[in-house]
Image (cartoon, rainbow, N blue to C red):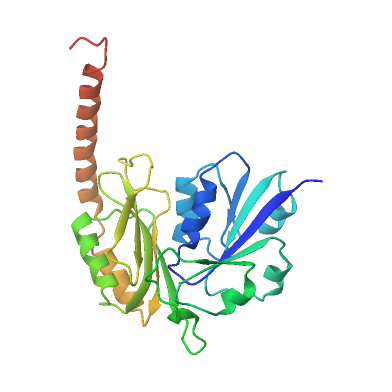
Amino acid sequence: MQSFDLTLVAGPPGVGKTTWISQFLANPSRPLFYLCPCAQDAVDFARIGYCFPWVSIISDDQAADVLADLPDQAQVFIELGFHMDLGSPLLVALPGRRIAIVPPSLDSSEWHNWADEVIPSPNQQVSGELASASGKLPTIWRSPLTGQVFDPPSLDEVLIELTGGAYGQVTRLKGIFELPDGQAFYVDFVEGLPGIEYTELKLPRWLEGRPDRFSGLEIVGHNLEQKTIAQALLTCCLADDVLLQYQRQYQQLQLEDETVAAETEPGVVA
């Protein structure tokens, strides 16, 4: 009989669910699978694929077939958004270990009641207010950005405004953005933690036209001015002629760097 391990991970936004899962995805010695239900256009869905290309990403429409025919020794991680009903028949029927990652300040919640194991969030300053029975759940707003390339200073300014409350209370922000030098960055913000974190994704530089790989923004918060946010993002996007000019410059710089590297290789006569 084939055997596999299935782990469901749940908790409030910003507690580090994807980070916790990622530590296991870094080892490709077993067949690895990742599913985040109802989030096919989510940033983390793409980030997992970019950072761990050996992981099989399961879409919603594939889930039933894939889970019914897993290879031997497979390890499956299912990340559950904070808005999902943990008592739904579909989730209840799934076998496997249930992990809840919660703020250290949160003593009891639906996640505590659901989980086999409760892990305190490494993000010590994340608030437990979201799980309050009297609290209103925040809104999730997602914007696909595939094909858009951003002016870095303008993007920085908008992200600072966003996380500073200019367009509503932002409790969580994450995004993948393409820059004119061909690099793609993952951007991460959690309310209560200092600053905005930028991480370069180890992807080939895109210097020929508009990128057709996924990029996008995901915001969790209250009273979000979605139209205003969308308009602010558009002001940071480069027009075709400007993007072409940038790409030509970076192509030339890349060519010069490659020439210098070739000339300094052992055995190459300048």
What is the total number of numbered labels drawn onto the structure image?
A: 0
Residue drawn where x is 50% and y is 57% of the image: 20
Of the pair 209 and 82, the residue shown nearer to us = 82
Residue 62 seen in render:
no
Q: In this view, does 189 lie above or below 73?
A: below
- Quarter of the image that includes the C terminus: top left
Q: Give the x, y percent position of residue 212.
A: 41, 48
| Most distant residue in the right direction | 1
* In the rendered image, the vertical position of residue 155 relative to residue 66, given as above or below: below
Relative height, residue 117 to residue 21 (above, below): below
Q: Please report the residue visible at 21 percent of the width from the left and 17 percent of the height from the top.
A: 263
Residue 148 point in image, percent of width and height: 32, 55
Is residue 31 in sight in this rendering? yes
The image position of residue 223, as x and y in percent, is 36, 83
Using residue 133 as the reference point, say whether residue 159 is left or right of it. left
Q: Which sits in the foreground, 145 or 113?
A: 113
Residue 213 in the figure: left or right of residue 208: right
Quick one: 254 or 109, which is closer to the camera? 109
112 left or right of 257 in image? right
Q: Where is residue 133 in the image (x, y as percent from the top left)?
A: 52, 87
Of all residues, the one furthest to the bottom in this rendering is 134
